Image: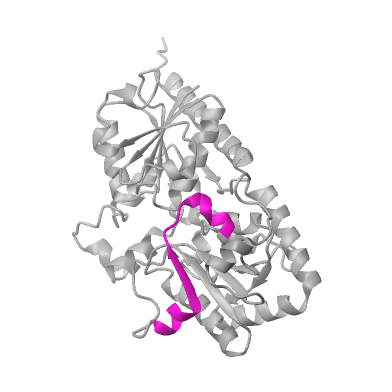
Amino acid sequence: MSNILFALYHDFGANSAVHVHNFANRLAALGHFTAVAIPEDKDTGASLGPQNYSVLRFDRVDGEWSRLFPDGRPPDIVHAWTPRENVRLFCEKLGSFCDFTLFVHLEDNEELILEANLGMPFEKLLRLRLETPPNLSHPRNYRAFIASAAGVTMIMDRLERFVPAEIPQLVLWPAADEKLFYPRPRDAALLERLGIAEGTVVLCYTGNVHSANARDVRSLYLAAAILDREGIPTRLVRTGRDFCPFLGPDEEWGRWISIELGRIPYREIPAILALADVLVQPGADNTFNEYRLPGKLPEFFAMGRPVIVPRSNVGRFARHGEEAWVIDKVDALGIVEAVLQLRRNKELSERLGEGAVAFAGKHFNWEKNAGELNAFYDRIVERRKEHVDVSTTAFP
């Protein structure tokens, strides 16, 4: 049994927190004591369901370990959930008063995120002496932080390019809570409350909009507008927050076609997804999408609806026409064409829904994936222990 501390770059309002919440709970079920440290405690995760782990703000982690773990011991394992600067500095502070095995989790091309947020090429950022926002990675420090880890987990295999070859790696996919996300009929009362008429094509997008994905999400609004203009009543049901403008100078066209629900409790998302005729992940295989796994995709696949994805990240693994509708570019015209094709072919649509559920069961399973993470921890900790034992052995 180990004490495992996850260090999250944001509070539980971040999509990544869903992953940490479930891994912490599953590892606790395996007999470990688990805890999550967050930079701010505006949202401590109560809406995600039972928390079999403790939660503490970064600045309150001060060596009084009973606040985190029932046995009062320090963490044996610290899992830095991304190499963002606030997490790196927190782990540096931890290292000043306890010893632990460090793991780092990667879920994005951090260099591209920096470029998008600071409006400057990464190579130029490397040459500048600047302080990056704490919720972003530092252009120089983040690579050194990754290199200091005993092991690295990554959400997509292509992220290995940012990891020194000698560091053990594990591709670690998230999952969907099978108690919440499963095939279910549309909620007629919810459709009526949202003002969606019978026969309307419903698209859903449950996620935030930021500078890196703004263009992709805009294409979903455009697709809904095109379908509606062409005589197919269509509405986009949207949850999440906007961190940048993305619809253009006149947003009215997009807001008219969409039903904006803002941020809603996590446990209400399945009922929203169940309204959809198809679930769409917009985008293409580019330097942003190829390195990530959109947090909503496990939930999309689990709902038993046809899922449209680009031939990138998850789309590289799903079988086209069986487990998902995989196309090179899920832009506005690509979405319109795919939706029309699925509307014309009910048998194909049903097959894709069934295939999506099967794909989710195989790849997006919390118990299975947490078991793989636990085995990875054990392997690395044991290797580290053997190294220490060998290096401290005295020879005559």
Front-most of 245 and 370?
Answer: 245
Residue 164 visible to an observer of this rendering:
no
| 395 w.r.t. 14: above or below | above
Query: Residue at position x 41%, y 26% from top?
Result: 76
Seen as rendered, the residue at the extreme right is 347
In this view, the residue farthest toward the bottom is: 230
Q: Is 4 placed left or right of 126 in the picture?
A: right
Relative to 153, is 391 on the left or the right?
left
- Tell me, yes or no, whether the highlighted magenta stretch contains residue 10: no
Q: In this orientation, which residue lies closer to the viewer: 335 or 390? A: 335
Task: Kindly report the secondary structure that dominates the magenta region of the rendered protein.
Answer: helix
Q: Which residue is nearer to you in this view: 260 or 396?
A: 260
* Residue 60 position in % (x across, y down): 25, 33
Residue 355 shows up from this direction? yes
Please check the rendered image and state whether residue 265 is part of the magenta-colored stretch, yes or no: yes
x, y percent for residue 312: 58, 66
Vertical arrangement, residue 254 with respect to residue 396, above or below:
below
Q: Quadrant of residue 103?
A: top left
Residue drawn at (78%, 72%), measured in percent from left and top? Answer: 346
Marks counted in the figure total: 0
For the point 31% across and 56% down, the residue is 136
- Look at the image and give the residue range highlighted in magenta: 252-271
Expressed as whole percent of the image width and height from the top left, the position of residue 53 reads 44, 31
Front residue of 52/10: it is 52
Q: How is the image coloured?
A: one colour
